[in-house]
Amino acid sequence: MSGRRFTCHSVAASLGALLDGGRRSEGTVLGSSSTAAYLAFDDVVVAVTARTVPLMPNGAAVIESDGLEAFDSGGVARTSSRGMRAGRVEVIWDGAVPVDLAVPLNEGQGARAVARRGSDLLDALGHEADPLAAIAGACPELVAGDGLEAVRLLFAGITDGDPEIAREAAGLLTGRGPGLTPDGDDLLAAAAAATLAFEGPAGTDRRIAGKLREALLVDELEDRTGALSATLLRLAVEGQVIDPVRTLLDLTAERGMWLRALGRLERIGHSTGGTYALGCALAAMALAGSNRKVR
């Protein structure tokens, strides 16, 4: 059978650091579809995605629109400075453009802008202004049992700047829900990234905000959720996110721009994109109201 070669047009700037200069040079193909392939290198998962899929913070995007099912699950993958090879498949990334997927810090913005972005996101998603009710309506499997209480704790932990409450919420939400990246993980990742993006304009103490983000990473993370989700959670706590999320968190982005980004985000996974957007809204409204700056 002939081989298949893919050429990357962009790679996440954090990918090089994730692979640590070749230390993680050999890995395993976890699985693939026509538009995405996931490969594990120790405790890191690399995502290779088609051009129709937004760039992931742990990934490389190829110019081709499909064909990534050519990666055989369980196969050995090896990386080099030029790219990656897994069986008959080769990915070339040495000429790709590095993209920094760090969230914006929104300097010069204020708490009102944070609150407005949170409420506007909920409105665009078809929900009322209550983020808890919105999550309950959109993610029934997530809020089943004690799930809704976990979401309430997440909102309270961010609002009160209390890492212990946030840690309790993370303990209940991590690995919760269906999907390759469970809804609970998506919600936590979005909240962590939004906390970094909005801490400045919301007037949140940076030390407290940092502790909140750290609290959202549970101990023994890989035992609680899948490898891909664990990778994305860690990156989100560091402020590295899926490409459209950056625009949702950019308070200078005009409505048309972030609405287009929201549309791209919602097409990711069965519920991943929508849950990310809800997590951004939840954190925005919690932070904006934390110091009673928004009336």
Image (cartoon, rainbow, N blue to C red):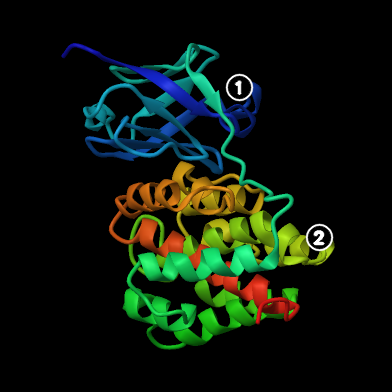
Q: Quadrant of the N terminus?
A: top left
Quadrant of residue 109 within the rendered picture: bottom right
Q: Is mark 1 on a helix, strand or loop?
A: helix
Q: How many labels does the image show?
A: 2
**Residue appearing at x 22%, y 35% in the figure:** 34
Report whether residue 278 is seen.
no
Left or right, residue 168 beside residue 51: right
Q: Which amino acid does label 2 sit on?
A: Arg
Q: Where is residue 127 drawn, in percent x and y? A: 36, 76
Q: Is mark 2 on a helix, strand or loop?
A: helix
- The quadrant in which the C terminus is found is bottom right
Q: Say if 118 sits above or below 249 in the image.
A: below
Is residue 167 depicted above or below 92 in this figure?
Answer: below
The residue identified by callout 1 is 22
Label of residue 206 in the image: 2
Q: How far apart are marks 2 and 1 (CA)?
A: 34 Å
Question: For residue 154, what is the image quadrant?
Answer: bottom right
Res 125 quadrant in image = bottom left
Q: In the image, what residue occupies the spot 32% across and 71% down?
A: 126
In the rendered image, residue 137, in percent from the top left (x then y), is placed at: 34, 80
